[in-house]
Image (cartoon, grey):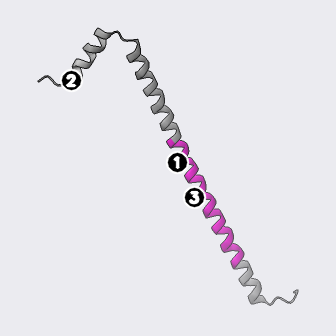
């Protein structure tokens, strides 16, 4: 069979199988890393939206209501 004996053929089949498993494994790792990156990006976007909402809320307050809210968080000495 094209000058390849059985032992070389079996070795080639095993090597091909091992390389395909390695490729599948590395693709799974890459997919998992992408999934983690997407979750981190979603969390960052949520945090940015919360930050923007808080900033907008503070900007709409007048000085007295802002001072009243701040008194809740400031230590009384």
Give me the disc on residue 36: 1
Q: Earlier in the sequence, mark 1 or mark 2?
A: 1
Q: CA distance from mark 1 to mark 2?
A: 38 Å
Indicate the secondary structure of the residue bearing disc 1. helix
Position of residue 16 measured from the top left corner of the image (x, y, whole percent):
72, 74
Task: Indicate the quadrant where residue 17 lies.
Answer: bottom right
Task: Indicate the quadrant where residue 67 lies.
Answer: top left
Image quadrant in which the N terminus is located: bottom right
Q: Check if residue 16 falls in the magenta segment.
A: yes
Circle 3 residue: 29
Depth check: 54 or 12 in front? 54
**Relative to 50, is 17 above or below?**
below
Indicate the secondary structure of the residue bearing disc 2. loop
Q: Which residues are magenta?
A: 15-40
Position of residue 21 measured from the top left corner of the image (x, y, whole percent):
64, 68
Indicate the secondary structure of the residue bearing disc 3. helix
Q: Main secondary structure of the magenta part?
A: helix
Circle 2 residue: 74
């Amino acid at each position: 069979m094209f000058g390849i004996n059985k032992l070389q053929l079996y070795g080639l089949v095993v090597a091909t199988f091992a390389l395909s498993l390695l490729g599948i494994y590395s693709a799974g790792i890459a997919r998992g890393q992408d999934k983690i990156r997407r979750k981190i990006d979603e969390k960052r976007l949520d945090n940015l939206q919360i930050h923007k909402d808080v900033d907008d809320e503070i900007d709409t307050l007048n000085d007295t209501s802002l001072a009243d809210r701040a008194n809740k968080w400031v230590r009384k000495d």
